[in-house]
Image (cartoon, grey):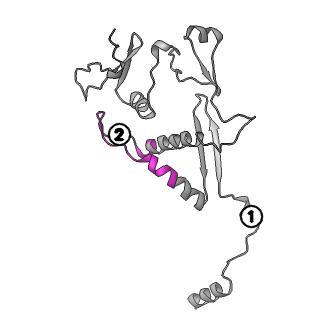
Amino acid sequence: MRVVANRIRAYLDQDGKEPDDADLVNPDNTLRLRKKRDGRVEFAGSLGPVEGAKFEALLNPLCKPRPADAHGPDTRTVLERQGDGFVDLLDLASCSKDLPREAGQRPQVTVTFSWDNLLTGQGVATLGNGTLEWQHGGATDLDNTVLLCGHHHRVVHHTDWEIRMISRIPWFIPPALIDPERRPLRNPLRAPMAA
């Protein structure tokens, strides 16, 4: 009898119950942000089915494990790969010509430092949200600076690879797993030019 009654109800009332105001109190898309004292941002939220499918379609290709290379296989956890993929997604979005503007400007990161630090190329800089990449006491100094892609930046911070600056040239020290003697390596493109 219940099966027959459900079929009759589905036939007579195909749209189901009429939505009420209580349904509108719980929106599909929410995002909660919280800035921590060390500058990190925590967030949580939920997306509706369509928006969630769009988000997954954009994020999934960016979260795949990287192929093994000279550093070995990709050892990041799923959570780390998803976090890195989300940052890559933000980088891609920040390049969009359709970004909204705030006070007439495209979204940007502000770095603040003193005039003396600018002139000498030494000292400490502060991000607009009050933190430094050099939050562990290091100086913002040209003699201690090297450009790395996002992947290699994470390798240096989360593995036993080290970088030592010698005469403003970065030398890369592999972990003992790769080279038990940990002999410094150097980018051959940075070799001194012949006079």
Left or right: 147 with respect to 105? left
Query: Callout 2 environment at 10 Å: few (<14), some (14 to 19), or many (20+)?
Result: some
Extreme-left residue of the structure: 180
- Is any part of residue 187 visible from this angle? no
Asked if the magenta segment contains residue 120, the reply would be no
Instruction: Report the magenta residues as a range.
Output: 57-80
Q: Secondary structure at mark 1?
A: helix
Residue 75's tag is 2
Q: Secondary structure at mark 2?
A: loop
Q: Which residue is mark 1?
A: 22
Please state which of residues 2 and 113 is positioned toward the viewer in this rendering. 113
Please state which of residues 33 and 66 is positioned toward the viewer in this rendering. 66
Query: Callout 1 environment at 10 Å: few (<14), some (14 to 19), or many (20+)?
Result: few
Please state which of residues 95 and 117 is positioned toward the viewer in this rendering. 95
Extreme-front residue of the structure: 195
Residue drawn at (70%, 76%) of the image: 17
Residue 95 is situated, as x and y percent measured from the top left of the image, at: 58, 39
Residue 89's tag is none
Q: Is residue 85 above or below residue 166?
A: below
Residue 140 is situated, as x and y percent measured from the top left of the image, at: 53, 16
Q: Locate the C terminus by quadrant.
A: top left
